[in-house]
Amino acid sequence: MDRCIVLVDAGYLLGAAATLLTGDATRSRLSVDHGQLIDQIRQRAEADTGQTLLRIYWFDGAPDRVPQPEHRRLRVMPRVTVRLGLLTRIEGRFQQKGVDAAMHAQLTELARNHACSDIVLITGDGDLLPGVMAAKDHGVAIHLWAVQAADGEYNQSEDLVAEADERHLLDRVWLTQAIKAAESSAAEQEAKAPSSPLHTAPGGEPEPPVQMPPRIPNPSALAQRPAPAATMRWSSDTGWVDPDAGFPLLRDLTTAEQEWADREHDMTQVTGEPREVGRTFATRWTQRLPQDQATQLIDALTEATPRIPRSLDGELLRYAARFGMIGNEMLEISEDDRVDLRAGFWDGITLNTGQLATAR
């Protein structure tokens, strides 16, 4: 069958890219445009093999094999299939289990069934050597792609390199079209900033330190501030009697078509970071309120900031449970993530309240 298939070991591709671009194999140090990366792989595979692409298999590890936000984005892309192994922490380091075995099984099955004439492998794992040899025996050409190594040497099994029919390099220029070193967070930048003046004025006197703009306190900080009448508390506090004030739930404001579109958007566009999830939920809730009730309901809601009515807060937590990295169906969500979810909720309310006022 004159077509090509790509098997991607995401741990190798992104780990080696992180080492090259940041000096550390930690993938969280990268910012990846997965759509751009898949397009580049497709175009490169078709150019290198001279065949039309049938499919890209993306192999990766995940805790309890629960798809992470990047996996949800990838698996709905055309011609992309995601296969997940287990990601476990051993002696403080994350390790993949079952990914190489899954790649080996897929490789040999494709070759045995003559599903393609060419297979592109993006991996460095020598455990795939028997599969490569078997695929060649079935008449499949093996193209091995290597990520440019930070030290200029091979970051692949020498036996695997020797067995491949064709070898190609994914260099820094090719990688950085879709993969960048992530910008350090504001907190990291602040931690690195010196507390003493850096510059000296022409007269020899030190210049005063730069005054940073005041931070807007998040709901977590507000909740810890004493107030004259009472301390601001979250809706999860049992000490607060929640009147609930008849606030509609998002599910009651959402049509079947909107619900389908929401899930599609969540799978492909929402990263799963708690604050972003809370902001997305609040945006939908605010924008779907009946126009003749929106102002009244939002005013009533914001009067109790940062408290959230129990029914609405419960729906927010259930919505967050869609994202495996935040929680699960039992709503086992850490307190830090709950704080970030609710902070994001109020971000969304504030943003969309301003937009509603502008529209009026």
Image (spheres, rainbow, N blue to C red):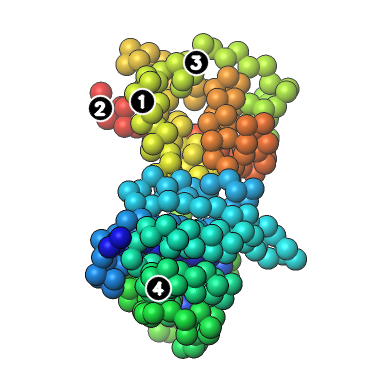
| Mark pair 3, 2: CA separation | 22 Å
- Any mark on residue 247, and which? 3
SS at mark 1 in the image: helix
Badge 4 is on which residue?
142
- Residue for point 62% across, 39% down: 327
Label 1 or label 3, whichever comes before in sequence order: 3
Badge 1 is on which residue?
258
> Is 161 drawn above or below residue 32 in the view shown?
below
**Does 251 sit left or right of 101 as displayed?**
left
Badge 2 is on which residue?
359
Q: Quadrant of residue 33?
A: bottom left
Mark 3 vs mark 2: in front: 3
Label 3 or label 4, whichever comes before in sequence order: 4
Residue type (three-letter) at the residue carrying disc 1: Gln
| Mark pair 1, 2: CA separation | 22 Å
- Residue for point 30% across, 60% down: 1
Residue type (three-letter) at the residue carrying disc 4: Ile
Q: Horizontal and vertical percent for residue 189?
A: 52, 66
